[in-house]
Image (cartoon, rainbow, N blue to C red):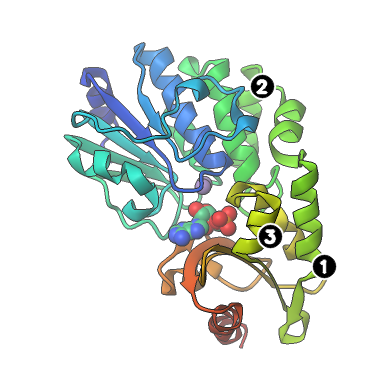
Amino acid sequence: MDLLEFWKDIENAETIGITGHTRPDGDCVGSCLGMYSYILNRYNKKADVFLEEMLSKFSFLKGSEDVITDYPDRDSYDVFIAIDSGDLERTGKAQKYFTAAKKTYCFDHHGTNTGYADQNMIVPSAAAAAELLTYIFDEDYIDLDTANALYVGFVHDTGVFKHSNTTRKTMEIAGMLLDKGVQPSKIIDGTFYEKTYIQNQVLGRCLMESILLMEGKVIISYISADVQKLYGITSSDMSGIIDQLRITKGVEVAILLKESKKREWFISMRSNNIVDVSKICVMFGGGGHLRAAGCTMYGSVHDCVNSLTKEIEKQLK
Ligand code: AMP
Ligand code: MN
Ligand code: MN
């Protein structure tokens, strides 16, 4: 990507749109609002941020109140930016702005990224899309609002700086963000560890119903659409469950199946040391990273798990 051109385009644009991906996670929200805050601080321009939902735990972030969740019709944007989304499909309803925009940019850290924008910056070694943004931001213009948003992205995609994507560089940049005034424990407890009573109940239920396969190398659990309805939960209420499954002693791969509608499953996969889960998820139309990936599958739990374990077996051989 020609970064000079990017910043020139931002400087000249009258309208700028930003989006992340469907079922937004902490990195998606943090990196989109980080870009929003940076553009506001550096260029005194208010970009439109489109996200499917704005989770209340992130509402302390600057710009969260301006996030647009209903995707109204708009004149085509001068510049439209996708962040943390590996393919156009995953930008969800924002696709219409993206395809109509005069110039599109994509900033992402998924190795499976399809390069769908006019200009793409894909850095798989970046622990989070938020980390990638720090490579292109001028540190002098990172204010506390920008730093808070980016820090959220770091915390969520690294599982509080413990996943294998965390590097020395990650920690050093996170340190720079602390210098800007970020208060880590507030953000980490408030957005990552804190769970509602219902979220804890669902976590407990998933662990109770989990099953070990392949001599304990694989653990699976699932949540049907009916159970989600019973508890009144959405996808974001289930974040963290997959991480608890993954740290089961002896397990190499954890799989969580979340039924979105009858016989349609959002699959989350995690691995510990050996299996490339992104490779498997790509086979089923999804994507992700070496140790954390996802896809959508159809059929019974049994069918989905069978197809996935076949591929895991091949890699473990
Ligand atoms: P999740 O299990 O939803 O936390 O996702 C793990 C990783 O895989 C994240 O980096 C996601 O962006 C990516 N991912 C999840 N689902 C999909 C999908 N359907 N297509 C592409 N990438 C995905
Ligand atoms: Mn994400
Ligand atoms: Mn990410």
**Which amino acid, by three-letter code, is at mark 1?**
Met
Q: Is residue 2 above or below residue 125?
A: above
Q: Is mark 3 within 8 Å of ligand 1?
A: yes
User: Would you name the residue on which mark 1 appears?
Assistant: 208
Task: Tell me the quarter of the picture where residue 301 sits.
Answer: bottom right
Does residue 115 appear to the left or right of 166 in the view shown? left
Residue 40 horizontal/vertical position (percent):
40, 16
Residue 47 screen position, x and y as percent: 35, 23
Which image quarter holds the N terminus?
top left
Q: Is residue 162 above or below residue 103?
A: below
- Residue to which mark 3 is pinned: 242
Q: Which residue does the image show at 57% across and 37% down from the upper left?
A: 153
**Which residue is nearer to you in this view: 233 or 289?**
233
**N-terminal-most mark, 3 or 2:** 2
Q: Which residue is mark 2?
A: 182
Q: Amino acid at mark 2?
A: Val
Q: On residue 292, which mark appears? A: none
- Secondary structure beneath disc 3? helix
- Nearer to us in this view, 112 or 3: 112
Q: How many marks?
A: 3
Q: Calculate the distance from the C-alpha at mark 3 to the C-alpha at mark 2.
A: 28 Å
- Residue 138 seen in render: no
Image side of residue 6 versus residue 183, left or right: left
Asked if residue 98 is positioned above or below residue 314 in the image, the reply reads: above
Q: Mark 3 vs mark 2: give the one in front.
A: 3
Label 3 sits on what residue type? Ile
User: Is residue 151 in sight in this rendering?
Assistant: yes
Cα separation, mark 2 vs mark 1, equals: 37 Å
Q: Position of residue 289 (x, y in %)?
A: 52, 59
**Residue 50 placement, left or right of 301:** left
* Position of the C terminus by quadrant: bottom right
